[in-house]
């Protein structure tokens, strides 16, 4: 009975990625070498890597479209302002409006690109 129990307990252990000693799969760190990843680094599937790349592209697109709309709004406000400080306030106001328009516009672009890719 004791040997069967030891074998069952041994099956619960994995080899540490760094030192090769037995360590529990649920351990936070290897008790022998102190490695914080005793199971080894996480390996992601191709599908997961593709999803992460798409999310990164979407985030970048959101920032670029929002900044572009804000910049165009600021340029329009500066050009249409009465001059001096009024132009600065108009640029700030229209830049804010451009930001408010840019976020949903980027969202729509991200959604529509997903439909056609």
Image: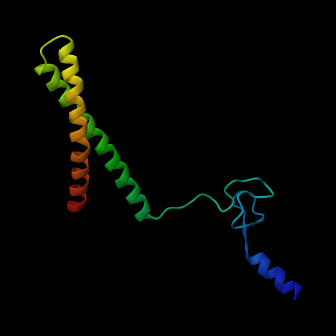
Snapshot quadrant of residue 17: bottom right
Snapshot quadrant of residue 38: bottom right
**44 sits left or right of 71 in the view:** right
Residue drawn where x is 24% and y is 47% of the image: 104
Extreme residue in the top direction: 84
Q: Which quarter of the image is occupied by the N terminus?
A: bottom right
Residue drawn where x is 40% and y is 65% of the image: 47
Compared with residue 5, is residue 76 higher up or lower down, i.e. above or below?
above
Colour scheme shown: rainbow
Front residue of this view, candidates 50 and 94:
94
Compared with residue 23, is residue 107 higher up or lower down, i.e. above or below?
above
**12 sits left or right of 101 in the view:** right
Front residue of this view, candidates 23 and 87:
87
Compared with residue 61, is residue 69 higher up or lower down, i.e. above or below?
above
Residue 61: image x %, image y %?
Answer: 29, 44
**83 sits left or right of 22 in the view:** left
Extreme residue in the right direction: 2
Residue 106: image x %, image y %?
Answer: 24, 46
Residue drawn where x is 26% and y is 52% of the image: 110
Residue 81: image x %, image y %?
Answer: 13, 18
Residue 99: image x %, image y %?
Answer: 25, 36
Residue drawn where x is 75% and y is 58% of the image: 30
Q: Which quarter of the image is occupied by the C terminus?
A: bottom left
């Amino acid at each position: 009975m004791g040997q069967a129990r030891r074998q069952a307990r041994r099956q619960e252990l994995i080899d540490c990625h760094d030192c090769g000693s037995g360590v529990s799969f649920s351990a936070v760190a290897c008790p022998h070498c102190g490695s914080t990843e005793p199971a080894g680094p996480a390996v992601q599937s191709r599908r997961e890597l593709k999803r992460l790349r798409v999310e990164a592209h979407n985030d970048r697109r959101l920032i670029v479209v929002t900044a572009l709309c804000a910049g165009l709004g600021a340029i329009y406000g500066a050009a249409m302002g009465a001059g001096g400080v009024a132009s600065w306030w108009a640029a700030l106001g229209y830049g804010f409006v451009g930001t408010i328009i840019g976020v949903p516009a980027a969202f729509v672009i991200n959604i529509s690109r997903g439909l056609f890719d």
